[in-house]
Amino acid sequence: MKKSVLLILLQCCALLSIPAQTGSENGSAGEMPAYYDHQLLKINFMELPSGGESANLARNRSINMIFMSDAGLPGGQPFISVLDAIQGYGFNPLWLEVQINFTAGHTPRQLFSDDEIANAFVAEEITLTPTDELYRCSVVGRK
């Protein structure tokens, strides 16, 4: 009896130590919300493998920008990304991440359009830092 209980306990421990599998970022697991001109959309988002960013940036002059703020908002709320284009409005499925950082004396807040981001930048409320991260992104619906 003790041997059976020990065997079951060991099997349970083994099962608990197996990492949970996550969905592929190529499918719906890569979906997230994003704003475009105050409109909340759902995008499918996947980072391209490292190493190919510079070649893609050199060959694709119309790469779009996705604005993110990893620091988030007050109260631990996430900053929802902002797109500078959607299908039919200068859209390219390749996106360069640009980080938004709020400057001292300015409380982080959600921005809803690239125009708001430009105005906040001119007013020195934020800084903008292009990253070396390039993403494949498509708008898949309204949120």
Image (spheres, rainbow, N blue to C red):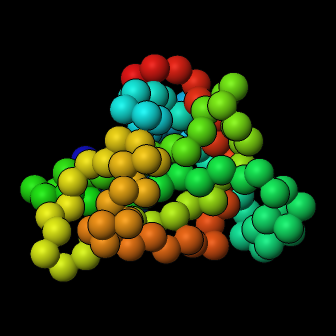
The image quadrant of residue 96 is bottom right
Picture coordinates of residue 81 (x, y %)?
Answer: 42, 48
Where, by quadrant of the figure, is residue 93 drawn?
A: top right
* 72 vs 126, nearest the viewer: 126
Looking at this rendering, what residue extends furthest in the bottom direction?
104
In the shown orientation, is residue 102 left or right of residue 27?
Answer: left
Tell me the residue at 40%/27% (across/down): 39
Residue farthest along the top direction in this orientation: 142
Picture coordinates of residue 43 (x, y %)? 53, 34
Q: Is residue 1 left or right of residue 55?
A: left
Visible residue check, residue 47: no
Q: Position of residue 62 (x, y in %)?
A: 77, 51
Q: Does residue 104 lie above or below 134 as drawn?
A: below
Report if residue 94 is visible in the image: yes
| Quadrant of image for the C terminus | top left
Q: In this figure, what is the number of numbered marks?
A: 0
Residue drawn at x 18%, y 79% as measured from the top left: 104
Q: Nearer the viewer, residue 3 or 99?
A: 99
Nearer to us in this view, 141 or 8: 141
Is 69 displayed left or right of 58 in the figure?
A: left
Q: Which residue lies at the image location 79% right of the left edge and 65% below the top edge?
A: 57
Looking at the image, residue 36 lies above or below residue 16: above
Q: Nearer the viewer, residue 70 or 112?
A: 112
Q: Residue at x 46, y 48 (%)?
A: 114
* Residue 36: x %, y % from top left: 46, 35
Kindly give the residue lying farthest to the right in the view shown. 59
